[in-house]
Every structure is written in C-alpha cells, then in structure tokens.
Amino acid sequence: MRDLPLSAGGDLVTRLARERDPVRAVVELVWNAIDAEADTIRVQLARTDMDAIERVTVEDDGHGITSDEVQATFGRIGGSWKALASRSKNDKRGLHGKLGEGRLRAFALGSRVTWESESVNMTGESERIVIEGVKERTEPFSWEASPSTETTTGTVVTALNEQDRSLNSLLSDTTLATLTSHFAPVLLNDDSLTVIFDGSKLNPSDEILDDTTVEVGLDINHNAVLSIRIIEWRTGKHRAIYFGEDAERFVVEMSGAELESQTAYSAYVTWNGFDVDSLSELGLGEMAPDPAGAVWRATKTAVREHFASRRRSRRRDQIDEWKSKGIYPYEAEPTTEADKAERAVFDIVSSALVPQIPKRKDGAQLTLNLLRDALKTDPENLALLVSEFVALTEQDRQALTKLLSETTLAGVIRAANLVTSRTKFLAGLEHLLFDPDDSKKVGERDHLHKILEHELWIFGEEYHFMNSERGLTQMLRTHLKLEGLPTGKAEPVKRWDGKSGRIDLHLAVKAKEHDRIRHLVIELKAPGITAGRTERNQIEDYINVVADNAAFASDRSVWEVILVVTDYDGVMDNSIIGSDRELGLVLEPDKKPGRPTVRAYVRRWRDIIDENKRRLDFVTSSLEFDPSLAEGLAFIRDEYSELVPDNLAADEEPRGGDS
C-alpha cells in the first residue's frame, strides 16, 4: 500500500486525530457520505458480550472514492468557505463537509480505521479503493487501488476499537435525538435520503414540536427578504442556524445557542442573494460586512423575537391552567410596583421550570408555594430549590409537606444549614490539629483559641455564656454575676502559690433545672504539646482555687475544668479515675458543705471530635452530607480567614494528615 501524505499543517492533523468525541466522529462520517451523494447511510455498532462497542461501521451507497480523487478529496485536510459553497460531484446536493476533517476525527471511534470504496473512475472503469488509517503512525494513512467487478458504488468505513476506548456516549439515550436534529436540514429537504443509526431511522418529522416560517426584510435593501424557518425540537440540545441560497442548500452552519439557550431548535435561513463571498463572511457574525452582517442581524432579531413571543404565549396558557386548578399561589391582583415586579418574576421563573414541576395537583401546589416563598427569601437559589424538591420520592415529598405544616421552610433550612456547617467545621478542625505540617503553624492563643470562641457547641450546647482570655478575678466576677451578687468589689484571686492565674476559656451557664449554675473552664494546649505532670498540676491549681476560695462558696455551683490536648503521657493516663478513658476524669474532690462541686478532666481532641461526629451522624446521614477534608478546611478559611495562619490560608489544597 502507498502512503497518503496529508496536505495540512501538522498541528491541525495532530489536533483532529486526538479528538475523542465519538458522536462528533459519527456526524462527520455521515456528512462525508451525504456529500458523496448517498441515498442510504447505515451506522452500525458491534458490541462485545459485555455490551462494550468493539467496532463502528458507516456504510453508504454513494459514488465512492476513485483513484483519481484520493489525494484531492481524501488527503486534503481543511479548506476554504468557497469550497464549502460548491456542489457535490454530480450536482446532486450542496456540499456540507469540511474536506477531510472527518477522516481524522474517525480515530475517536478506534485506533485503526479502514475505508473500502467501490467507484467508477474517469475512464469508466470500476475499481476498488482501500484506505487504511492507523492513529499511531506519523503518516496515518496508506492506500491501494485494484480493478473491481462490482456493479454498485459506495463506501464502508470500519473503525476498530482495539484499545478498548469507552464509546458509551454512542449508547446514550440522547444520541439519537442529537443526530436527528443535526441532520434535520438535509433530511427534511431531501426525501431520497435515509440515515439509520444502530437500527433506528432518523426521522426529524416525528421530533418537531413547532414549525414556524417568518419573513423579514434586510435593512440594506428593502426589496431583499429573508425566509427563516424555525423548528423547535421535542428532545435534545441541538441549537443551530443554517444558511443557504434555497431550501435544499444549507451550506453554512453556525451555533444558535447565543440566541436561544432554553429550547432545542434549528433555524434555516434562505436568501437568493447569497454568493460565495457573503456565505464565507457569515462566520464573522456581528463583525461581518454587509450583506452578510445584515443577514446575521436580521436573523438574530427574528429568532429572539420568535422565542420571546412563544414564551409569553406558553406562560399565559400555563398561568391560566394553574389558576383554573386553584394552585396558583397568589390570589389578589398585585397593587404596588413591588408586588407587580415579584409577580412578573414568579411567572417567568415558574414557567421556565414547568418540566420540573410535578404533574399531581398536591405536588405542583407545594412546589409553586416553595417557589413563591423562596422568591421572597432566597431568590438566587430558586432553581436549585425547585430542582431538589421535584427529585424527591413521593414518600419524602409527603413528609416535607407535613413538616412544613408544623414549621416554616426557613426553619428547616436553618436547621439543615446548622448541621452541615458544624460537620464541615469538624472536618476542618481535624486538619488544623492533626495535619503533620499545618498543625505546627496553629498557635494556641492566636488561632485555635480565637476560632473556638465562635464554636463553643463543640464542648456542649448549654455553654452559651463565655468570657475569654480573662484571669481568675474575672472568672469570679462571672460567678458573682450568675449568682445575682454585686461584682464591683471582687478582690483579686490568686493561685495557691500566690501568682495570678490566666485561663484560656471560661464558659459559664446558669442551668434551668434545679436553679443550679454550671461553670466550664477550658484549658487549651497547642497541637504539638503532649500533656503530662506540668499540665495536670495546672488544672489542679484551678480546682484548688475554686474549692478553697471563699469568694466561690456556693452550694448551687458546679465547676468543671477540662484540659484539652492532642495527646497525654503515662503520668496523665495514670491519673484518670474510673474506666471511662474517653471522659478523662482526673480530679473530683469530695464536696464540702457550702462549697461548689468541682471536677477536672483531661480530654483528647480526637475523642471530642468523634463524640460530636456521633452526635451529628444521625442527621448528616439523613441529609446525605459527608464533607471532604478539603471542604472542611475551606469552611474554616471562609469563616475565619483572619484567624488562621497566613500561609495556611493561602494554600490551595490541604495536605493529607492523620485525620
């Protein structure tokens, strides 16, 4: 076989050969067959026992490729808009193809592609052309020609998926709709053409939701009239505009997503004034000179006005239907400008979300009510809210309906947000405490202490009153305040050794039951400290001050001192009283008459975090929420950016630690 050099820039050949869109590859190969004047084109998918695609075949009955044309029609990659505007070989159709790009895109279907073509050459002799493409070769194609006895012409393209590439997109439920809408221009205007994909015939007529033709004048010539046929499709996402001299020759295709983003559609623009130059200039859009620029402007205006009119009509019909069923969430007509604006926004948004709204009356009514309430409280998340609601099972939807009859949507959202925020905080705190690198950057007072001031629930929901970074004297003032006693003449409080004591966190609450006052003193240690004898003596000092100082005398008070550390040594471990190592009780002097109850604990961060996780686990499981470590650290960065170490806040991703 002879090598077939490709006449194109190497970067273009490399780029096309590396593309991995199987659907687009099929589209290009089918267009090649259409340009070859085929009447019937079949795309067949051969599957393995595991239902994976091992071979894709595109077969047509077109005029084939002759030896005279191999280099000119097959070896050339790329081309001009002038070539695009030319007719097919026997003047049967206007050419669509891009002069060979489909040959290279075929490698998205397999690493080895073969073209076997039967044709009649310029001397009237039948011949067989075989072209083989191998993706890994520098010159990917080789070919040979031989005499043939076949009386019919056509080409069979076979792509072998030797590398087991995933071609699952060809099996998607949306692929047939995508191909149908893509080939609609030529299928609707050429009754002789049939395209069959994996056994299913492409029939755009069955997919048409609406078919409207409008005529508009060009602003450069009042006698020039464009005919624009706009077809809305029932399924798919295809949005394109086609331009041609007549209804059979749409030789230029442009994306229509900019003009209409919600509806799948095709717009076919015909004008008998098109020539090669104006067609080639349409690709410039707004920047194109007239007449191409005028055509584009008129097309853009007509398409947008068409869909705006269609939406207004559908919106009126839908609102009237909801009102007739008694489920429209507004009763009286709007009176103020604010009410009118809200109503207009509701009508627009609700109409756009009609496909997502349940058909049943009760489900539709609840969804519309949720939409109305969300419009008042959280308009930025309207679509997400409705999308999540309509995805509920019937059982869950009924449960939500009952719940909203007993509380408010705002209350449900706040409760869910509280739980998810706390879960993310725990994940981020684990990183700050246990990451081998970042934990070294976290300071006890500068970072950890200041963050925890805002997250005191981690020690217990009841600790809603807090004085931070205050000495024992201030702790006494807090105690006196909760006791209802004057605080102005509180004498300075000293430790047993006569020195002033400074506590990290003093949390206190007056318990509602039995008129008791509960105090919690938290002594935090930086992540790198392993608690031992020194730290045990420190919390014992706090216990002695409270137990022995007459200023703290009260039968109603309970004082608990908790030393919170990453880990502790054998001395501290041996001091733990009882079998509950996780609780970590180390001191509990006998209560004396007229004196408070005092206890001291040592607790590891691991145990505190795990305890909170267990407490939140039931709700987070119900919410199907499990934040990653990255999400947890991101939460702490967002909430406390000014309190975390600068170099930690600047990191893009957390490193893995021992969490």
Image (cartoon, rainbow, N blue to C red):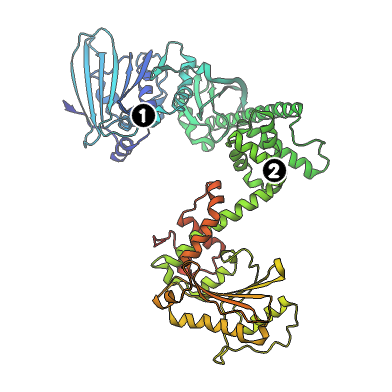
Where's residue 288, x and y in %? 51, 35
Q: Is residue 556 left or right of residue 455?
A: right
Pointer 2: residues within 10 angstroms few (<14), some, or many (20+)? Answer: some
Quarter of the N terminus within the rendering: top left
Say which of 48 and 504 sits in front: 504
Q: Give the quarter of the image for residue 105.
A: top left
Left or right of 227 in this view: 437: left
Residue 171 shows in this picture: yes
Q: Quadrant of the C terminus?
A: bottom left
Residue 127 placement: quadrant: top left
Q: Position of residue 152 (x, y in %)?
A: 28, 9
Give the quarter of the image for residue 458: bottom right
Q: Which numbered circle lies on residue 25?
A: 1
Q: CA distance from mark 1 to mark 2?
A: 51 Å
The residue closer to the viewer here, 153 or 203, is: 203
* Residue 297 picture location, percent across and down: 58, 32
Q: Amino acid at mark 1?
A: Ala
Residue 82 is situated, as x and y percent measured from the top left of the image, at 40, 27
Q: Nearer the viewer, residue 550 or 204?
A: 550
For the residue labelled by badge 1, is the local secondary structure a helix, a strand or a loop? helix
Q: Residue at x 60, y 89 (%)?
A: 494
Tally of marks: 2
Indicate the secondary structure of the residue bearing disc 2: helix
Which residue is under mark 2? Answer: 404
Tag 2: amino acid: Leu
Q: Is residue 589 above or below residue 625?
A: below
